[in-house]
Amino acid sequence: MATVLKWNGKDLPDELRKLPEGRYVIESVDAVPALTPAQEQGLEEALKELDRGEGADLEDVRADLDSIIRR
């Protein structure tokens, strides 16, 4: 689950108050670094594979992500 918030740098945003207790990572979306040429090429190749129907099965992707998140 992602929560997008706009912060004025001073007051605690309501979006943070609504989140359940836990640990969070906050990262600015305004400071996203540009993709390298290799990353750009990799994304283009992946899109072409999907267009050819060579994508991964949804259940396999979910299982992979679950195993990564659980570590």
Image (tube, grey):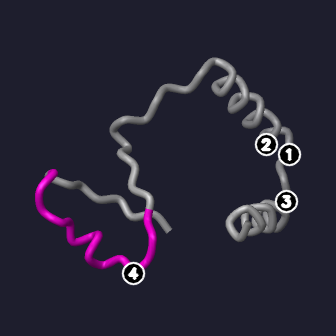
Residue type, mark 3 in image = Asp
Distance from Cα at disc 1 to Cα at disc 4: 41 Å
| Residue annotated with mark 2 | 50
| Crowd rating for badge 4 (residues with CA inside 10 Å; few <14, some 14–19, many 20+) | few
- Mark 2 or mark 4, whichever is nearer to me: 4
Label tally: 4
Residue type, mark 1 in image = Gly
SS at badge 2 = helix
| Residue annotated with mark 3 | 57
Tags 2 and 4 touching, CB below 8 Å: no
| Residue annotated with mark 1 | 53
Distance from Cα at disc 1 to Cα at disc 3: 10 Å
| Crowd rating for badge 3 (residues with CA inside 10 Å; few <14, some 14–19, many 20+) | few
In the rendering, which numbered label is found on residue 21? 4
Q: Magenta residues, as a range? A: 9-24
Image x and y of residue 39, in percent: 66, 27
Measured along the vertical axis of the image, is residue 57 above or below residue 54?
Answer: below
Q: Is residue 4 left or right of residue 56?
A: left
Dominant secondary structure of the residues highlighted in magenta in the image: loop
Which residue shows up at 39% across the image and 81% down it? 21
Q: Is residue 67 left or right of residue 15?
A: right
